[in-house]
């Protein structure tokens, strides 16, 4: 089945009277059916599945289920559950009955933004002993909120989840390939730049069967970071068999700490195998242990981060304290080597090479007689001795009774403002 819509495809709700869900399905219904289910492809700009509705390719019989492919250029949004139930909205591909003979199909999602929240899910699963299918998601961003989940669960070996996205965030949500039997807990492979887990989120490939080993987790964040906060765990644990393998390549890991089985025992203050669960700690942990198998069945956690010297970029600062007054340039007073020229009304004379203009001619008034220079007036003049006041350099200033600024040499009876002292560098000139 192929569905094409230029704008959007929306699947919503269910019928309360019959409890039947809204959905787009290509299922193998009859337990006696031997044929395989058909494939389902949706191509659109936006896909919305909410309130208990589903898009599924399941099998109840002997034939295999088909594969589900979603290509939504802008967004895929999966929200909510069926009213008053725990039946999730979502994309499903699986084997529904334990006695079914068929195998589960695959799910492929290609979109700009993927949102899974409020109990919605994307699941490939198998209730029989057939392995779960493969779930592949390619998106610009993947966001799981409030019990959103991406899973590949099975009674046999766990399925495989492959995620390609620059940004993957989980808030109280999970990505899991748990297995209750078979050989291993499945694999989770992530290629991205930022993995952010918070608020009790989990990324797990745990195995609960007696012979099943923990699955593998490969997180390739070569140019990015892993952040784990608020009791968010990454685990590849096994209940009785060997723990799985976790490999992390990142620029840095913040908040999450790898722990061995012995470290879990110390942190939880117990040696009981059934109690060795990192979820019981308030911290965010990375583990690949065997709960009952002991340390000899410990899994492997490998963390690769760049080697660098944190002090390599530091600059040694001088220990001498600077005197800020020595950093301020201070002007020098006028002393030798300086001159001041008063040219009078005519201005500066022209150079010998310049022509003479009429406005450059200086006129001098004729000398007139002073009446005091006449002989009859000289006899009335009395010679007065002249007071000699030597010129001294001003060293301060003050405000006189006319509110005027007056330069003074010294005045001990009044408040005088001194000039700043002459810098030593000026005296050496």
Image (cartoon, helix red, strand yellow):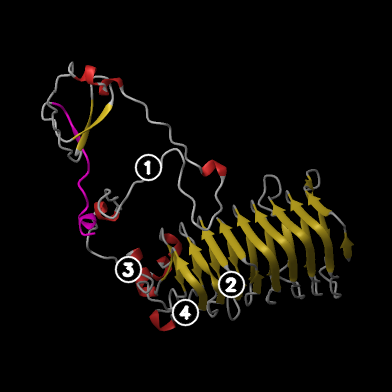
Left or right of 330, for residue 238: right
Look at the numbered disc 1 and give the secondary structure of its residue.
loop
> Which-is-in-front pick, marks 4 and 1?
1
Between discs 4 and 1, the one toward the N terminus? 4
Which stretch appears magenta?
Answer: 414-429
Labels 3 & 2 near each other (Cβ < 8 A): no
Q: How crowded is mark 3: few (under 14 residues within 10 Å), some or many (20 or more)?
A: few
Q: Name the residue under label 4.
A: 302
> Which-is-in-front pick, marks 4 and 3?
4
Q: Name the residue under label 3.
A: 266
Q: Which mark is residue 180?
A: 2
Left or right of 366, for residue 57: right
Q: How crowded is mark 1: few (under 14 residues within 10 Å), some or many (20 or more)?
A: few
Figure quadrant of residue 311:
bottom left
Q: Name the residue under label 1.
A: 342
Compute the Cα span from label 1 to label 2.
108 Å
């Amino acid at each position: 089945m192929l569905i094409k819509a230029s704008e959007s495809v929306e699947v919503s709700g269910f019928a309360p009277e019959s409890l039947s869900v809204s959905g787009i399905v290509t299922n193998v219904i009859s337990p006696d059916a031997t044929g395989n289910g058909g494939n389902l492809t949706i191509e659109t700009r936006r896909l919305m599945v909410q309130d208990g509705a589903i898009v599924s390719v399941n099998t109840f019989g002997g034939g295999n289920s088909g594969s589900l492919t979603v290509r939504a250029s802008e967004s895929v949004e999966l929200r909510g559950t069926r009213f008053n139930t725990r039946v999730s909205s979502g994309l499903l591909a699986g084997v529904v009955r334990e006695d079914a003979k068929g195998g589960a199909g695959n799910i492929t999602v290609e979109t700009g933004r993927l949102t899974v929240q409020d109990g919605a899910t994307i699941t490939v699963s198998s209730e029989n002993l057939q392995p779960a299918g493969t779930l592949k998601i390619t998106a610009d961003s993947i966001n799981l909120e409030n019990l959103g989940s991406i899973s590949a669960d099975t009674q046999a070996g766990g399925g495989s989840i492959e995620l390609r996205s620059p940004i993957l965030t989980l808030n109280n949500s999970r990505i899991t390939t748990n297995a209750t039997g078979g050989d291993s807990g499945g694999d989770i492979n992530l290629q991205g730049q930022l993995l952010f887990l918070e608020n009790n989120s989990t990324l797990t490939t745990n195995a609960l069967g007696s012979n099943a080993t923990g699955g593998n987790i490969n997180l390739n964040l070569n140019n990015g970071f892993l952040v784990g906060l608020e009791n968010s765990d990454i685990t590849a644990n096994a209940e009785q068999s060997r723990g799985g393998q976790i490999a992390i390549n990142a620029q840095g890991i913040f908040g999450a700490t790898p722990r061995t089985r012995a470290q879990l025992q110390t942190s939880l203050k117990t040696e009981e195998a059934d109690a060795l669960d990192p979820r019981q700690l308030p911290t965010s942990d990375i583990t690949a242990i065997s709960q009952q198998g002991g340390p000899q069945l410990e899994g492997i956690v490998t963390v690769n981060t760049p080697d660098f010297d944190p002090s390599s970029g530091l600059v040694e600062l001088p220990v001498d304290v600077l005197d800020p007054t020595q950093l301020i340039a201070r002007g020098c007073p006028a002393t030798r080597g300086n001159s001041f020229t008063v040219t009078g009304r005519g201005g500066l004379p022209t150079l010998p090479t310049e022509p003479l203009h009429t406005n450059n001619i200086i006129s001098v008034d004729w000398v007139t007689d002073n009446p005091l220079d006449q002989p009859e007036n000289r006899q009335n003049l009395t010679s007065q001795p002249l007071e000699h006041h030597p010129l001294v350099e001003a060293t301060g200033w003050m405000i006189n009774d006319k509110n005027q600024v007056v330069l003074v040499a010294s005045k001990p009876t009044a408040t005088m403002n001194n000039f700043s002292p002459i810098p030593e560098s000026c005296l050496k000139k």
